Amino acid sequence: MASVRLEGLRKTYPNGHVAAQGLDLEIVDGEFMVLVGPSGCGKSTALRMIAGLETPTGGRILIGERDVTALPPQDRDIAMVFQTYALYPHMTVRENLAFGLRMRGTEKGEIERRVGEASRALGLEPVLDRKPAQLSGGQRQRVALGRAIVRDPKVFLFDEPLSNLDAKLRVETRAELARLHRRLGATIVYVTHDQEEAMTLGSRVAVMRDGFLQQVAPPMDMYRHPANRFVAGFVGSPAMNFLPGDLIGGLRQGAARDAVLGVRPHDMTLVSASAGDIDALVDVVEPRGSELLVYLRLGPRGDGPEVKVVAPPETSVEAERVAGVKFDRERLHWFDRDSGERLSP
Amino acid sequence: MPGAEPISGVERQEARIAWWLVLPAVLTIMLVALFPLVWTVWESLHLHDLRMPWLGRPFVGLGNYADALREPRFWGALGHTAFFAVASVGLELLVGLWFALALNRAFRGRGLVRAAVLVPWAIPTVVSALLWRFMFEGQHGIANAALMQIGVVREPVVWLIHPQLAWVPVILADVWKTTPFVALLLLAGLQNIDASLYEAARIDGASARRQFRYVTLPLLQPAILVALIFRTLDAFRVFDLIYALTGGGPGTSTEPIALYTFNALLQNLQFGYGSALSVIVFLITFSLALLYIRFLGAELTGARR
Amino acid sequence: MNGRNWWPAVALGVLVLASAFPFYWAIVGSFTPEARLFQNPSLFPTEPVLDHYRALFTARNFWLPIRNSLVVAGTTTALCVIVGSLCAYALARLQFPGKVPLLGFILAVGMFPQISVVSPLYLLLRELRLINTYPGLVLPYLTFAMPLTVWLLVGFFRQLPGELEEAAMVDGAGRLRAFWEVIVPLALPGIATTAILTFVYSWNEFLFALSFTLGPERQTVPVAIALFRGQYQIPWGQILAAAVVATAPVTLLVLAFQRRIVQGLTAGAVKG
């Protein structure tokens, strides 16, 4: 296993589109680093540059302190799991697993040993002689994983590997990946657009937007202290509410007019009208089993901005009624209205 | 300029591999296509008659071209070619579209139809020419027999002796041979049209004819254009078919420009003049191709929409 | 809607009949004695004879053109497919400067009128003493069959998911190794189809074969048939027999692989 370092990594396409703008990122040996962001933010491009499938227009990539920027993928000692798995359709599972070792001239006995180990670990023994077309989605996923594991590479790269699975399988496989990471102690760089995946899997999360890194931090740090408005709105579900800073007086020590107040739906409570920080008109109530998701419009007549609040399931609240909203003073986030940067409370 | 940073080692390596892979094909093509074309242009500017070698090879500038433009047989050949192209391509598109629509509906016997449709396309053009010539030959070919049977004509027609009627077997033979291909192209285009569009149109109250006009035709445009380009370019280059069916006759009344050029070159051995004709044919084909590509490119990338 | 269901079937019936009839008629004619060919044509042969076929293979020695066509078409196809697939792979998958104009150039050559290069080619081949030889035909054939081959193969290669090669490269294979191990096995159906189409194209070629051969020793089937001459009149019986013989192999090929052929032709064409 090895560390990965990106230094000033840039990628500009011939048509002018800038996919990466000077990325500086340090991934520690054994870390599970998740690159997350909306589509088009450059996370896949960054991953592909680490893999060597795209060439950067500037900057360096170091794997284990070795500068690999000019090396083709086959010389980087990395393994990659693609979004569509990219299993070789004309080869059996066994041959798929053995392919990488065969390319490196590993001798047959060693190949058999490693393929056997990986297939045992992933429960692929019964399907070793089948072709990918005969496997289920979950099995194919595991073959893709197996192909990577068998190689014993320095770094594992994952490109949205769960997006093609149904919801239930996704959750199961997520747990598998976490287990895998623990067992192998592998350095993993993982790309996804799903913030929930990022938060649950990563030891650190890197949020990207328009080719820039917005914030790199462990999941809970990022949740509690988002560096800017974008990260705050991206991480956490339901998304954070943003309100004009001066809507409710007395919440901020500093000037509130040029600030935006961010507060998470979980950090607000519903009370009776006039008993909270501000009144609001209830719009829609979504019962979700373990909680209620309540949509409200602020202001006693409901002509202010819309907010979402997560309330305990027994809360008595009805559409078209006025309720009071109370903010958790410890959990308020302030952002500059123009730059989006985090402000001190 | 942003983005114009130096190509890294990996990219240069890939480009190098690519050029090695492409080289043999490109070299062959250049040697046997490009170089002769240049030579033809050069030849066309000289007088070069192999029957009269003592005249040498003097430079005559555009003299050969002027001769061509003055020659009524040249204009005749151009006219024949244009007529042939319009008639056969027009028929092929109409008939091909009709068949494509039918093929799109039916589901049984697809294989049989596909096979029937491919075989005329697959045989040598001269053979198809001979098959049709046999049917229209003299007074007793099967065509005459059939026509007299249904009463369209009362006496046998000697098709190949008649300057205008000789075109009938020619065009029929071409349509027979290539309509299947056009039908297949259009069928593929039809099958690419999402069925739900028709359903939406039907719900909106569109009759079958309107569905055809507002859903089918517009979405079929790219396929129609592709068929149009290929067939027109082929029609302008027609040679095999007419050589074997009528030989350009009677006289020169069915002679297309390619056959006229061929006769000038390899029959009369007028290399200079024949080269000028070759260049003219090339220019016509080339401009047609460019014209189509401009339209086709715009259509395919949805520039008009 | 239900009442209108007869017209597709009728249309298809017409299509099949119209396609088949000229062949059928030729086959009937090939078994009909020469004297009766143009008298009272009947739909079924009344007294079938083998005279024409016999004459074809003895007096006319039709084996020669068949052999020539096989050699020329076979060699052209083999070379085209090998050289063309390398070229097509580069065009379909690799990035290099000048790629788009190159593809345009190759396609443009495919649209050349052959007549425009016949005379210089004739002179060139005469210089190289290749008139009336096999290489003298294969070389020009390569040039004009290559664009077709490349265009078809580019279409087939493009249909394969790009991630397969990427996976192979990450796994340790270089570009060429990835091509050989992953792309070629998967593209084999497409390559086979391309080979068939190239073979058909070469077999049917006429103008170059007519111009660059001098006699039966090297003439191909289309030329031999077109130049059939009788002593007093056109030997229709033998021509028809020759036509049947000439088209039988190609017909069988096409019938056997029709689905693939249609896929190959239309996929490339409709998607541009």
Image (cartoon, rainbow, N blue to C red):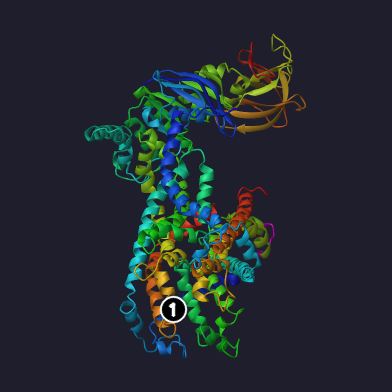
Report the side of C47 relative to B125 (left or right). left
Q: Is residue B131 above or below residue B291?
A: below
Of all residues, the one furthest to the top in this rendering is A253
Q: Is residue B210 at least partly visible in the picture?
A: yes
Span highlighted in magenta in the image:
B203-208
Report the side of C125 relative to B282 (left or right). left
Q: What residue is rendered at 41% in x and 60% in y?
A: C126
Residue B204 included in the magenta stretch of the image:
yes
Residue B172 included in the magenta stretch of the image:
no
> How many numbered dots are placed on residues in this image?
1
Answer few, some or many: residues within 10 Å of disc 1's Cα (few below 14, many 20 plus, some between 14 and 19): some
Q: Position of residue A258 (x, y in %)?
A: 72, 16
Q: What residue is rendered at 38% in x and 83% in y?
A: C31
Q: Is residue A82 at least partly visible in the picture?
A: no
Q: Position of residue C237 (x, y in %)?
A: 40, 82
Q: What residue is rendered at 47% in x and 33% in y?
A: A160
Which residue, given by chain and number where applicable, does mark 1 sit on?
C24
Q: Name the main secondary structure of what is drawn in magenta.
A: loop
Q: Chain of mark 1?
A: C
Question: In this orientation, which residue lies closer to the viewer: B176 or C231?
Answer: C231
Question: In this orientation, which residue lies closer to the viewer: B62 or B245?
Answer: B62
Q: Position of residue C80 (x, y in %)?
A: 40, 53
Q: Is residue C154 above or below residue A156?
A: below
SS at mark 1 in the image = helix
Quadrant containing the C terminus of chain A in the rendered view: top right
Q: Amino acid at mark 1?
A: Tyr
